[in-house]
Image (spheres, rainbow, N blue to C red):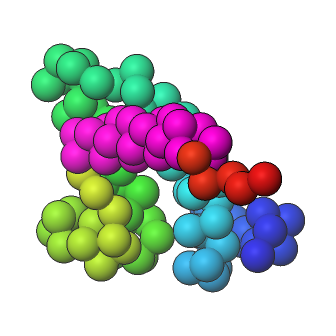
């Protein structure tokens, strides 16, 4: 699904818009906000708790938008339903994946000459 496929309908007499299809809402959120969080994960390592809490609130609101939940719904269960990690764990996971990928690439370079037969 692409962003241009989404049907955005204005709500009567308000400045807000309602996205009529949950998949469109998820596409917009993943395309705009989550991607920026993912690209900057390494920079968020050891950020102050106040800043991490702000990012967590953004992610919680995104989860509620995707699932079309109200403001009183539990944010933690929404993140679990979407299989999203909280911001601090997301940062740690991204760093671990980057380190493991780098280690695997080094090991492949080390083992390649030993495995090649002539």
Please, is residue 82 above or below residue 111 in the view? below
Does 96 lie within the magenta span? yes
Which of the two residues, 14 or 95, is positioned nearer the viewer here? Answer: 95
Which of the two residues, 100 or 41, is positioned nearer the viewer here? Answer: 100
Which of the two residues, 18 or 87, is positioned nearer the viewer here? Answer: 87
Residue drawn at 44 percent across, 65 percent down = 65
Quadrant in which the N terminus is drawn:
bottom right
Please, is residue 24 above or below residue 61 in the view? below
Which of the two residues, 91 or 52, is positioned nearer the viewer here? Answer: 91
Residue drawn at 78 percent across, 53 percent down = 118
Residue 30, position in %: x, y? 57, 57
Residue 12, position in %: x, y? 63, 68
Q: Is residue 8 left or right of residue 66?
A: right
Q: Is residue 73 visible?
A: no
Residue range of the region highlighted in magenta in the rendering = 87-113
Q: Is residue 41 visible?
A: yes
Residue drawn at 34 percent across, 63 percent down = 84
Q: How many discs mark residues in the rendered view?
A: 0
Residue 54, position in %: x, y? 27, 32
Furthest residue toward right = 4
Residue drawn at 40 percent across, 27 percent down = 42
Does 3 lie within the magenta span? no
Q: Tell me the chief SS of the magenta region.
A: helix
């Amino acid at each position: 699904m692409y962003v241009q496929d989404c049907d955005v309908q204005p709500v009567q007499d308000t400045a807000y818009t309602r996205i009529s299809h949950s998949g469109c809402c998820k596409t917009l959120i993943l395309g705009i906000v989550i991607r920026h969080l993912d690209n900057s994960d390494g920079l968020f390592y050891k950020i102050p708790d106040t800043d991490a809490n702000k990012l967590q609130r953004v992610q919680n609101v995104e989860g509620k938008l995707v699932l079309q939940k109200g403001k009183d719904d539990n944010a933690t269960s929404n993140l679990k339903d979407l299989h999203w990690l909280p911001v601090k764990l997301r940062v740690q996971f991204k760093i671990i994946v980057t380190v493991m990928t780098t280690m695997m690439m080094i090991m492949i370079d080390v083992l390649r000459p030993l495995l090649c037969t002539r």
